[in-house]
Amino acid sequence: MASHAPRTSSDHPSHEQESPGLLTLTCGEQPEIDLEIKRSHFLARACRTDSTKEARDFIARVRSIHPDARHHCSAFTITDLTQGLEPLPHPTERSNDDGEPSGTAGQPMLDVLRGTGLANTTVVVTRYFGGTLLGTGGLARAYSDATAQALARASRVLVTRRHLWDVRIPVAQVSRLEADLRSRGGTGSGAVRVEETIWGPTHAVLMLSSGSSDPTRLHGLLAALTQGEAVPEPAGSRLTEVPVRPSSA
């Protein structure tokens, strides 16, 4: 039989019902926003960063894009996905005022970032001074607003753990079972999905996944669809990303 793609986690699922998810940004470039207040420009950009090194590299990259700006204030929150999602590890959080008065930039930015529920995200707000002092309250509002606008425009994903099972069935039954699972596998994170099919001369192995680690429903579903012939075998788990619409708030 052909070898399977690499998987993570134990081959023996626990009895939790649904794996928690982690909300973050999609990988790649996100839009930059330009907030102008009294001729000062606050350029805000957010990025998916899965480690503190990636966060610091992103901050350095923004500095290189705007080398003549007076301030590059930043905030990030990082959750180590290598530790899994059950339970979610405590995040590493950092903020930097980068020369602005203490507490007027980095901390307000971090407060906004926390409020979104986003993880593994870094925000940098670059300020071009326009000649008019904004005061400590004005600066805090400006950096908060720029951060909020950048995050509101950023595309998001929900990282969840999908639990995997292998099901061995005759080749002649594959098409019918795949169609039945598509129509009766359910919806939402607990839905049963066919991830891939590994073909052999007489039998095929369907890799099935679900957001639930409890196989009770899967056993019942397969028993009904195959008259008890197909028995799922636990095959570990893996992290997947599902696009999420940003909040309208």
Image: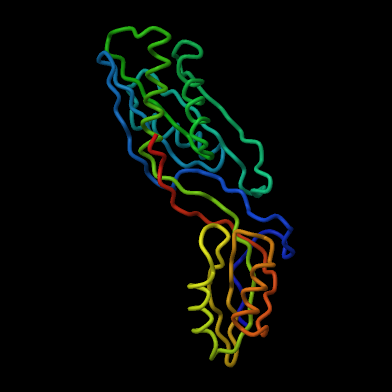
Q: Quadrant of residue 153?
A: top left
Q: In this view, does 103 lie above or below 164?
A: above
Q: In this view, does 188 lie above or below 221?
A: above
Quadrant location of the C terminus in the rendered image = top left
Residue 235 % position (x, y): 67, 69
Q: Is residue 212 above or below residue 89?
A: below
* Marker count (numbered): 0
Most distant residue in the left direction: 39
Residue drawn at (36%, 31%) of the image: 149
Lateral position of residue 27 relative to residue 192, left or right: left
Quadrant location of the N terminus in the rendered image = bottom right
Residue 151 % position (x, y): 41, 35
The colour scheme used here is rainbow
Residue drawn at (65%, 43%) of the image: 88
Residue 241 % position (x, y): 50, 54
Residue drawn at (41%, 24%) of the image: 72
Residue nearest the viewer, comparing 198 with 87: 87
Residue drawn at (52%, 44%) of the image: 23
Lateral position of residue 139 relative to residue 217, left or right: left
Lateral position of residue 43 relative to residue 231, left or right: left
Residue nearest the viewer, comparing 172 with 77: 172
Residue nearest the viewer, comparing 15 with 89: 15
Residue 6 % position (x, y): 61, 66
